[in-house]
Image: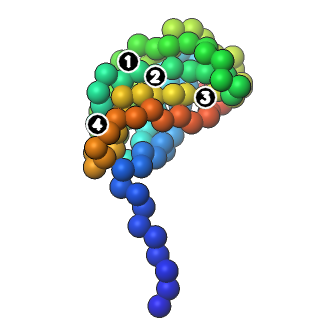
C-alpha cells in the first residue's frame, strides 16, 4: 500500500524553452497538449519590466515558436508570458509564465 498523486489535467507544464540568438526565435515546448485562442507571447525582465513582444511563426498542440521584436542579452534571465492558452481538458484560457536564460 502507498500513496500516489494524480496530476491536475488542466495544468499546463512547460517542458523546454529555447532561444536562438541569431534569428531572435523563441521556442516553447509543453508536456501538456494545449489549445490556443488569440495567443500572445511577451518577454519581461525577472523584475516584471516589459522587454518585447513577438510574432508567432508556428504553433501546434504541444509547442509554439515566435520571433521576438528585439534581441535578448545573451546569458541574461528573462520571463516569458504566454496568453490565450489552455490545456486540452481545461475549460478556460489563461496566461502562463516561466523564467529562462537567453542562451543557445
> What residue did someone put label 1 on?
56
> What residue did someone put label 2 on?
41
The Cα atoms of the two marked residues, 4 and 3, are separated by 21 Å
Q: Residue at x 32, y 39 (%)?
A: 92
> What residue did someone put label 4 on?
35
Looking at the picture, tell me which residue is in the foreground, 92 or 19: 92
| Percent x, y of residue 25 | 49, 19
Q: Residue at x 51, y 8 (%)?
A: 69
Q: Secondary structure at mark 3?
A: strand
The reply to whether discs 4 and 1 touch (Cβ–Cβ < 8 Å) is no
| Percent x, y of residue 39 | 36, 24
Q: Which sits earlier in the primary sequence, circle 4 or circle 3?
A: 4
Q: Quadrant of the C terminus?
A: top right
The Cα atoms of the two marked residues, 1 and 2, are separated by 8 Å
Q: Residue at x 69, y 28 (%)?
A: 46
Q: Mark number for residue 21?
A: none
The reply to whether discs 1 and 2 touch (Cβ–Cβ < 8 Å) is yes
> What residue did someone put label 3 on?
79
The Cα atoms of the two marked residues, 4 and 1, are separated by 15 Å
The Cα atoms of the two marked residues, 2 and 4, are separated by 15 Å
In the image: residue 22, left or right of residue 41: right
In the image: residue 78, left or right of residue 11: right
Q: Residue at x 49, y 80 (%)?
A: 3
Q: Nearer the viewer, mark 1 or mark 2?
A: 2
Q: Which sits earlier in the primary sequence, circle 2 or circle 3?
A: 2
Whether residue 104 is situated above or below residue 25 in the rendered picture? below
Looking at the picture, tell me which residue is in the foreground, 26 or 85: 85
Amino acid at each position: 500500500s502507498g500513496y500516489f498523486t494524480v496530476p491536475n489535467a488542466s495544468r499546463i507544464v512547460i517542458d523546454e524553452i529555447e532561444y536562438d540568438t541569431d534569428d531572435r526565435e523563441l521556442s516553447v515546448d509543453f508536456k501538456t497538449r494545449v489549445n490556443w485562442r488569440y495567443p500572445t507571447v511577451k518577454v519581461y525582465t525577472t523584475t516584471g519590466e516589459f522587454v518585447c513582444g513577438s510574432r508567432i511563426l508556428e504553433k501546434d498542440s504541444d509547442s509554439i515558436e515566435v520571433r521576438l521584436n528585439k534581441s535578448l542579452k545573451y546569458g541574461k534571465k528573462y520571463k516569458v508570458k504566454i496568453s490565450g492558452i489552455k490545456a486540452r481538458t481545461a475549460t478556460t484560457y489563461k496566461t502562463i509564465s516561466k523564467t529562462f536564460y537567453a542562451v543557445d
